[in-house]
Image (cartoon, helix red, strand yellow):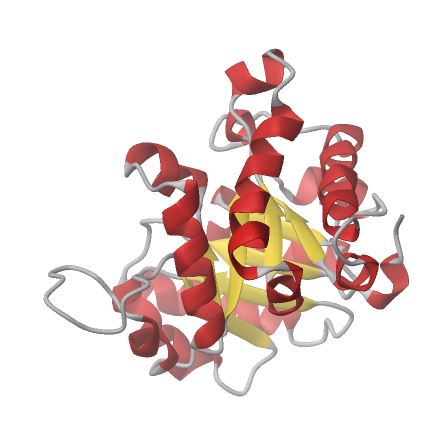
Amino acid sequence: MSKKSIRRKLVVGNWKMHGGIVWNKALLEGLTAGVRELRGADYAVCVPYPYLFQAQAILQGTNLAWGAQNLCAIEKGALTGEVAPHMLTDFGCTYVIIGHSERRHLFHETDDSAAVRFYAAIKAGMTPIFCIGESADERESDWTEFVVGRQLDSVLRRYGVQALTNAVLAYEPLWAIGTGNTATPEQAQEVHAFIRNRVAKCDSEVAAGLRILYGGSAKAANAAQLFAMPDVDGGLIGGASLEANEFVAICRAAN
């Protein structure tokens, strides 16, 4: 099932741990100039915490939204080094990435902790971009649907399908992140359709309106083919979001 016409494309840049005051300014100004006339989709960048003030200062009033790459589910307390949801909304964050594979695998975040942070973002008024995806070994073992379904169910079982009405999902196969390998449009569509159908079993209306992004070495050269798939509603873009012309070209592909 796919009622694609009611879903507006979304392209989100994930800067990861890249940036600097001077470099950020040039990139953000290049991005805002490049997407200014692109009104057929939505665009955002998720920047490192220290640069949220700069993103807000440069991007407010433009059609490029901004957000963060993680948050702590606890609102305040003795948690040195953590960042609470209200600290992100203080800087006007619209989006926050939750459960990125690098957080899960390098920092040992779990399905349960990702689900709790997902809901904390919603309570704070932000849109979580909830990342799910399988490793190369899991794909080769034909466990893709099991792994992706388990990660998605961590939210559905805890908070119910209606929580997804204020959220975005991102399918990011681990074997395609930072490797230069990209899922073919058909491979991406297969998993996106599985995700949407799993949500539809709980609520078909929520599933029809749910935006599911592809993340995994997407770039200008393959964005149009990926975005043409009926259940691919945009992209969560890593390395290609660090170069203005490349990211703008991906945004154009979403129009």
Of 94 and 147, nearer the camera is 147
The image quarter in which residue 221 lies: top right
Image coordinates of residue 241 in percent, x first then y, are 51, 52
Query: What residue lies at 29% left-to-right and 64% top-to-bottom?
Result: 49
Side of 239 where 191 appears, left or right:
right
Q: Give the position of the C terminus as an image quadrant.
A: bottom right
Query: What residue lies at 78% left-to-right and 70% top-to-bottom?
Result: 40
Compared to 77, does 1 lie above or below? above
Side of 227 where 77 appears, left or right:
left
The image quarter in which residue 176 lies: top right
Of 159 and 179, nearer the camera is 159
Query: What residue lies at 71% left-to-right and 43% top-to-bottom?
Result: 195
Q: Is residue 100 visible?
A: yes
Image coordinates of residue 239 in percent, x first then y, are 48, 43
Q: Is residue 28 visible?
A: no
Compared to 57, does 159 lie above or below? above
Image coordinates of residue 78 in percent, x first then y, are 10, 66
Of 172 and 228, nearer the camera is 172
Figure disc tally:
0
Image coordinates of residue 167 in percent, x first then y, are 59, 63
Compared to 103, does 143 lie above or below? above
Of all residues shown, which one is farthest toward the top?
Answer: 141
